[in-house]
Amino acid sequence: MLAEQRHQLILRALRSGGTASVIDLSKQLDVSAATVRRDLLKLEGDGLLSRVHGGAVIEEDRAPFDEAAEVQVAEKDSIAARAAELIEDGQSVILDSGTTVHRLARRLHGRRLTVITNSLAVYEELSADENIALMLLGGMVIRESRMLDGFMAEDNLRQVHADWTFMGACGIRSGGQVMDTTVAEVPSRRAMIAAGDKVALLADRSKFPGSGMVKICGPEDLDLLITTASADDATCMALNEAGVRVITTPPSAVDGWAEVGV
């Protein structure tokens, strides 16, 4: 079993029970206790758990998808509305598993597009729309995030190419670094970035600085940020100066939008 797969399964076990012992994890993963201890050391270094005597406890405080989907809804809809305007009929788009990206998917009905996604929520949203060619990436089902992830998703992404990648994040640092809270999800997000001609980050004001100890990418990997007017001005300006086009939207989708630096 690859290290990434073990990390994913360890975090899942901890999310389910809050704690887990090295002995139990060793049995579940069919690896040695020494291997589990090395995995726990790596995950602790990434800020995803804390080791305790004989095992580990979860430190992650990430809301499940359904809970996160109910937060900042008006802002997410405003961001999604602007993102949808950028997509031309006939294009291919990669949509990640974030809740703001899911709001974008809801605005693509009836469009002649190809949508590539690892999000079960996006799949459910678009599966009945015959105008959309829909590709669901393979991988392990992460129920709490309503997504598919892991090395199979990465392998699938190496075989595709898209006009756009739309992605979310848990946090954006002052220097423009895009962060996640879950180490196991980072490789597939990086593969999405590599597979898209243009990469757009969709992030409401709560993501500045947000949370996350694991870096997904830097500003050099982004073409566009769509956020809300109340987002951190200094971070938005830093991204703009790094060559990222920054579009700010109002609190709701019914008003206008603006660009930083223009």
Image (tube, rainbow, N blue to C red):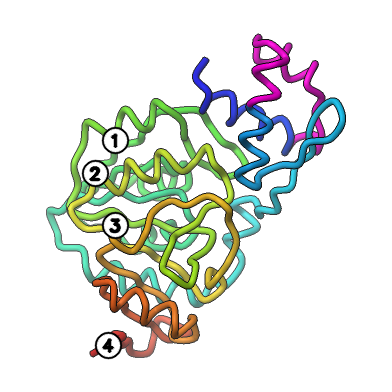
The percent coordinates of residue 184 (x first, y second) are 52, 37
Q: Which mark is residue 157?
A: 1
Give the structural element (helix, strand or loop) at label 3. Answer: helix
Label 4 belongs to which residue? 261
Of label 1 and label 3, which has the lower sequence position? 1
Disc 4 from disc 2: Cα separation: 28 Å
| Dot placed on the residue nearer the N-terminal end, 1 or 4 | 1
- Residue at the (65%, 47%) spot, across then down: 47
Pointer 4 with pointer 2, Cβ within 8 A? no
Q: CA distance from mark 4 to mark 3?
A: 19 Å
In the rendered image, the vertical position of residue 112 relative to residue 185, given as above or below: below
First reached walking from the N terminus: tag 4 or tag 3: 3
Task: Report the predominant secondary structure element of the magenta stretch.
Answer: helix
Task: Give the extent of the magenta segment.
Answer: 16-38
According to the picture, the residue beneath numbered tag 2 turns out to be 195
Q: Are marks 4 and 3 in contact (CB under 8 Å)?
A: no
Secondary structure beneath disc 2? Answer: helix
Decide which of 122, 41 is in the foreground and name it: 41
> Between marks 1 and 3, how big is the CA–CA gap?
17 Å
Q: Is residue 211 left or right of residue 92?
A: right
User: Type of residue at label 1?
Assistant: Leu
Amino acid of disc 2? Ala
Specify which label sits upstream in the sequence, 2 or 1.
1
Determine which residue is flagged by label 3. Answer: 221
Q: Dot 1: what SS?
A: helix
Kindly identify the amino acid type of the residue bearing the numbered disc 3. Answer: Asp
Residue nearest the observer in this picture, 182 or 108: 182
